[in-house]
Image (cartoon, coloured by chain):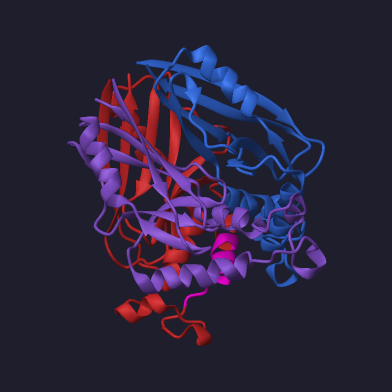
Chain colours: A purple, B red, C blue
Amino acid sequence: MKSHRKSLSIHLNERMGFVNITREVEKAVAESGVQEGLCLVNAMHITASVFINDDEHGLHQDYRRWLEKLAPFNPGSDPAQGGYLHNRSGEDNGDAHHKRQIMGREVVVAITSGKLDFGPWEQVFYGEFDGRRDKRVLIKIIGE
Amino acid sequence: MKSHRKSLSIHLNERMGFVNITREVEKAVAESGVQEGLCLVNAMHITASVFINDDEHGLHQDYRRWLEKLAPFNPGSDPAQGGYLHNRSGEDNGDAHHKRQIMGREVVVAITSGKLDFGPWEQVFYGEFDGRRDKRVLIKIIGE
Amino acid sequence: MKSHRKSLSIHLNERMGFVNITREVEKAVAESGVQEGLCLVNAMHITASVFINDDEHGLHQDYRRWLEKLAPFNPGSDPAQGGYLHNRSGEDNGDAHHKRQIMGREVVVAITSGKLDFGPWEQVFYGEFDGRRDKRVLIKIIGE
């Protein structure tokens, strides 16, 4: 069994945003030499996501608006005012911990004949919900 | 290490629906000859899900109603009217890309002694949110 | 290839609650002897979740309130009164099947140099949405 590990560094200047990391994942698969196996890609931070969907700008704006509705940003810590108790810890990112649960922490992708075994529109994205700091994505590949 | 790949073809006549694919996944595990390993099952399309829950008709109707509330179907592209910017691309399935994020893209199931290592009620479902076209599910098994 | 299987027993006295199971998962990784591989941790029940986020009490209270808003507990079976058709089956846990979809069934974690390959704040939690009965969590490790 072979294994390969790689981490990506990501820094967004906005609070919320999506970055297509498919090319980086493909590169890691090629480096691994794995022909048949599984590729895990996960956010190493708990206010960020890795997910698979379409690389379409309008959709990403829709996601932003929708996530803001499901878990609105609010720096306060009084739930009666829409705040998050989490923010009592000195953070203002309570909303980000919720948005990340909707979009997910990780994806697992099959590797077949040395390539990501994807449907026609599948692309891997990093989703940031508390940006303006350095974050990391982990890629772990096992197989043969 | 052994590996096995199989894809399922699915075509629903409705826009939204759920199909129990547990038997097909079990068959793929048997074909693989894997006794101890992992089984990935994922939608190859970005308006569909694979998830594990109960095979209970009332629950599936509840899911439909709930997903319609969280991300209502709207063929328009004006967010002020409940539409999705994604639909400017000529699609009418903006809602489906959101529903799929709630229900998830994939499941990973343990294989133990040659069988899916499931709790008493776990069943694997394909979830369709933009039906009336051919879709595929990928099963990838690795182990020994 | 090595593999290791372990199940955890969990019993919460409340309907909804979160339990940090990171130490148990670390123990299973140590027992497995796997240096490089993948670790699957999943709920074996369909009204429970395994997820990764912060071990912060305020956040967990926020999650409780948020999940209750997205899928309110209601023992009834009339959707027009906020009930769940699922509850016609004699259950009162329709809400729990919805909460679990938001928080997810499973996590897959990389194992590197014999340890869970985690970012600084990642902790593994069992999420219970229909407690007061015995439940199980499955840990399955493969690698070398």
Q: Nearer the viewer, residue C47 or C19?
A: C19
Query: Which residues are drawn in magenta?
Result: B62-73
Q: Is residue B83 visible?
A: yes
In this rendering, position of residue A47 left or right of residue A142: right
What is the quadrant of residue A144 in the picture?
top left
Q: Is residue A40 magenta?
A: no
What is the quadrant of residue A91 in the picture?
bottom right
Residue at image position (76%, 44%) is C57
Q: Is residue B71 visible?
A: no
Compared to residue A106, the image places residue A57 above or below, namely below
Q: Residue B131 at what x, y percent from top left?
A: 36, 66
Q: Is residue B70 magenta?
A: yes
In this rendering, position of residue C18 left or right of residue B9: right
Compared to residue B38, the image places residue A45 above or below, namely below
Residue at image position (25%, 37%) is A29
Q: Residue C126 at what x, y percent from top left?
A: 65, 37
In this rendering, position of residue B140 left or right of residue C27: left
> Image quadrant for the N terminus of chain A?
top left
Q: Nearer the viewer, residue B72 or A108?
A: A108
Compared to residue B52, the image places residue B76 above or below, namely below
Q: Residue A60 at what x, y percent from top left?
A: 42, 68
Q: Which secondary structure type mostly characterizes the magenta part of the structure?
A: helix
